[in-house]
Image (tube, rainbow, N blue to C red):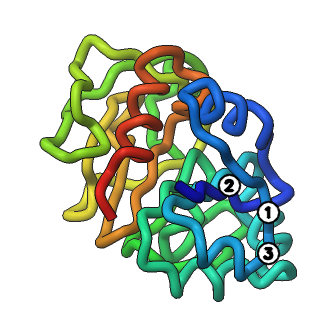
Amino acid sequence: MSIVIIDTACANLSSLKFCIERLGYDVLVTADAAKIKAAKKVFLPGVGAAGAAMQIINERKIPEVVRELTQPVLGICLGMQLMTEHSAEGDVDCIGLIPGEINPIDAPEHVRIPHMGWNTLSTIPEHPLFEGITKDDYFYFVHSLCAAPSQFTLATCDYGQTFSASIAKDNFMGVQFHPERSGKSGAKIIKNFLEMKA
């Protein structure tokens, strides 16, 4: 199986690469359009600010490539947010793969922002990406903005407000947490994605 992590130049790609390799898969980190299109599974990672990230990936013409993909694509953290239509962070248009907008977490004053640390999911779907995942599984989050629940929400999490911990439309899926930094539970998510039928 050909697995690609898109080199967005705005993520810690090594931790995701090592997690995939620990599961027994070979993986290529690349921004080459032909190799991305030829892959069976594609990861879209990202950390940092949406405005800066979109500038980088636009320069690399990554949005045009990703929009044409028909194989399963998994966005992680900022990568998930960039799959939506717009982010308030930098007031920037995103790739537009999944309807929705990214806005600051609407949290009471006593709730610390960013949401940083381990949390469980408040709702878990019957979806291949979450096979074997329960409300006892913890995932590692680091974010100040989020997608509100919508018809494209797979899983939710509660922190100051209820937000989309995972979204999906067609072959495009995203998780707000970092599965590659979430121990066995996160590795299960990645394994589920890699074993998902196209």
Rounded to the nearest whole Å, what is the CA distance between mark 3 and mark 1?
5 Å
Check the image and report above or below for 138 versus 86: above
Task: Identify the secondary structure beneath mark 1.
Answer: strand
**Quarter where residue 175 is shown:** top left
Number of numbered discs present? 3
Q: Is residue 154 left or right of residue 53?
A: left
Q: Is residue 43 left or right of residue 53?
A: left
137, 159: nearer the viewer: 137
Residue hosting label 1? 30
Task: Tell me what residue is drawn at x 46 percent, y 76 percent.
Answer: 97
Residue hosting label 3? 32
Rounded to the nearest whole Å, what is the CA distance between mark 2 and mark 3?
11 Å
Check the image and report above or below for 12 versus 109: below
Q: Earlier in the sequence, mark 2 or mark 1?
A: 2
Asked if the residues shown at circle 2 and circle 1 are in contact, with their CB atoms under 8 angstroms apart, the answer is: yes
Task: Tell me what residue is drawn at x 59 percent, y 58 percent.
Answer: 2
> Looking at numbered disc 1 in the image, what kind of residue is underneath it?
Thr
Asked if the residues shown at circle 3 and circle 1 are in contact, with their CB atoms under 8 angstroms apart, the answer is: yes
